[in-house]
Each structure stands twice: as structure tokens, then as C-alpha cells.
Amino acid sequence: MIAIKNEHELEAMRQACRITAAARALAGEMVRPGVSTRAIDHAVHDFIVSQGAKPSFLNYSGFPASACISVNNVVIHGIPDGRILKEGDIVSVDVGAYYKGFHGDCAQTFACGAISTEAQKLIDVTTQSFFEGLRMVRKGNRVQDISHAIQTYVESNGYAVVRSFVGHGVGRNLHEEPEVPNYGAPGRGPRLLPGMTLAIEPMVNVGTYEVQVLKDGWTTVTADGKLSAHYENTVLITDGEPEILTVNEGH
């Protein structure tokens, strides 16, 4: 069942999402050569806790960290460790915060120092594909109208959308109905209604859309070893324009 949030619930979600977005921004500021992914994770953890919230991902189904930090060919669910970031890396950071009974969820791919033209284009296309999908977030449209817009834009730029993992509803639970694929035919899926909150998150690969999950059960990499990027926001369907809940203050 798809949860419709009332105004009281939405205010709590906005607060959770503001904390989540601020944690993502903090992580992005730390992405530079010489920094370990573990150091970024620790900073994200400490910030979220300092806001009176809890990291949504920590111990979620056994995940051992507060942020998923995925470098280069890692698509999602990278486990922070002693890896030191290098000039030219691209670093996807996915974070969630749980506050007053609700979760926020967002992600972004950041450049580590100077990166290749190809890597920058991948990040730009991935980010813009979210906004192409956002244009379809209107009362009365269907979920796969979002999916189709994302896929069409990504593939028109010569990239592939990951199919094994999808966006999702978010609220009292980190993952709720409905699933929000980043590909598919328009006019299908549940109808969008005001009060629904969705985590829309294109995951885009330079090469094949095929991915592999490594032996740790989490780290997901591109099957061909090529680069991948990720961009995600928690979005509210309204009577008019959608509201991005995980928006960075001052941006």
C-alpha cells in the first residue's frame, strides 16, 4: 500500500530531509584527494547524530556504515573503508537520516579534484536525468512516466540506466511502495497522488546496464568495469509543482 502523508507527517519529513541533504553536502565538501571513504562516513555519522537524528543506513539489513560511498565503477552500496580517494575519481555518496519517525534519502556523485571530460559528462547527464524525470512528477501521472523520461534522456546521451536497482517510496520506512524504475514504458504503474513521497534515483553507467554484486553482499559494480554515477532526491507530489524535500539550504 502506498502511504499518503498528511501535513503533520510532511513537516517531520521535511526536517528529516533537510538533515539528510546537509549530510550529503558535507560529504561532498570532503571529497578530495587524500581523504579516506571511512573519514567521510564518520563525518556523516557524527553530523546526523548531532542533529538529533539517526543514520538510516547504519545496520539497515546489516549494512555496516552510515553512508554508501561508491567510487568510479561502483554503482551503489559501496562500504566505506580505508580507501584513499585519488585525483580523477568520481565518488557517489548516498545518505539517509531518520528523524521524528521519518526518513530522508538522497545521493550525489562528486568529482575528486580534476576529472576527465567523460566523467564530468556522465555526472551531468545523471543529474539532469533526475530533473527530466521530475518534470513528470505531477498529480494524475503514473510512476513509469517518470521512468520513461529518465531512460529516454540517459539513452539519448549514449549511456545506460541500471535496471537491477530502482527508486522507491520513502517515509516511515526507508523503502516503501511504489518502486520507481529508471526505465520502462510510460502510462504504467501507480497513479501519482498528492502526499506521496518518492526517492527518485537514476543510476547511470557509461557502458552496459548490467551490474554485479560482490561477495560482501553489498558492493555493486558495473559488469564491464566502466564508470557509474548516481543522483537522488526525496520528492513530494503536490497539487502543482513537485517539492524536492532533500534540497540543500542556501542552494
Image (tube, grey):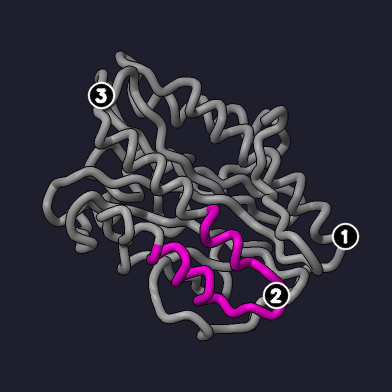
Amino acid type, callout 2 = Ala
Up the image or down, 230 lies above or below 82; here it is: below
Of 234 and 3, nearer the camera is 234
Q: Residue at x 31, y 61 (%)?
A: 155
Q: Are marks 3 and 1 in contact (CB under 8 Å)?
A: no
Tag 1's secondary structure? Answer: helix
Separation (CA) of disc 2 from disc 3: 41 Å
Tag 3's secondary structure? Answer: loop
Q: Please state the horizontal and vertical placement of residue 8, each as a whole percent of the image.
A: 88, 60
Mark 3 — residue?
88
Of 35 and 194, nearer the camera is 194
Mark 2 — residue?
3
Up the image or down, 156 lies above or below 80; here it is: below
Query: Which stretch is magenta?
Result: 131-152
Amino acid type, callout 1 = His
The main secondary structure of the magenta stretch is: helix
